[in-house]
Amino acid sequence: MAPDEMTAIKAYIKRKYKSNGSVKQQRGALIVSVPNSALAATIYLERQTLIKTLGLKDKLVVRTG
């Protein structure tokens, strides 16, 4: 995963949900950490849209933390 994809995910979360999130790559998966469980659930429900919009190829995992 390129650093610009990580930046794109962070920008998407900031723009759409007005919240900060962190992104890291680990064992072929993209780990997105957000500050609260409500936001994590919302992103999880919309993750297919996020994957298609940003053209992600790795598995997307959403966590609270």
Image (tube, rainbow, N blue to C red):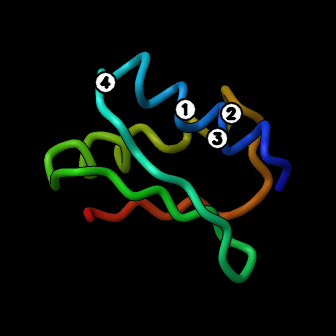
Q: Which residue is mark 3?
A: 51
Query: Residue 5: image x %, image y %?
Result: 75, 40
Q: Is 60 left, or right, of 62 in this rendering?
A: right
Q: Within 10 angstroms of label 2, few (less than 14), some, or many (20 or more) residues?
A: few
Which mark identifies residue 4? Answer: none
Task: Verify CB contact (< 8 Å) between mark 3 and mark 1.
Answer: yes
Query: Residue 26: image x %, image y %?
Result: 66, 77
Q: Residue furthest right?
A: 2
Task: Verify CB contact (< 8 Å) between mark 2 and mark 3.
Answer: yes
Q: CA distance from mark 3 to mark 4?
A: 16 Å
Can you say whether 61 is above or below 20 in the image? below
Of marks 4 and 2, the one in the foreground: 4
Q: CA distance from mark 4 to mark 1?
A: 14 Å
Task: Verify CB contact (< 8 Å) between mark 1 and mark 2.
Answer: yes
What residue sits 23% from the left and 51% below the top? 35
Q: Is 30 left, or right, of 35 in this rendering?
A: right
Q: CA distance from mark 2 to mark 3?
A: 4 Å
Looking at marks 3 and 4 on the same chain, the residue that comes earlier in the sequence is marked by 4
- Callout 3, which amino acid? Ile
On the rendered image, what quadrant is the N terminus found in? bottom right
Q: Which residue is mark 4?
A: 17
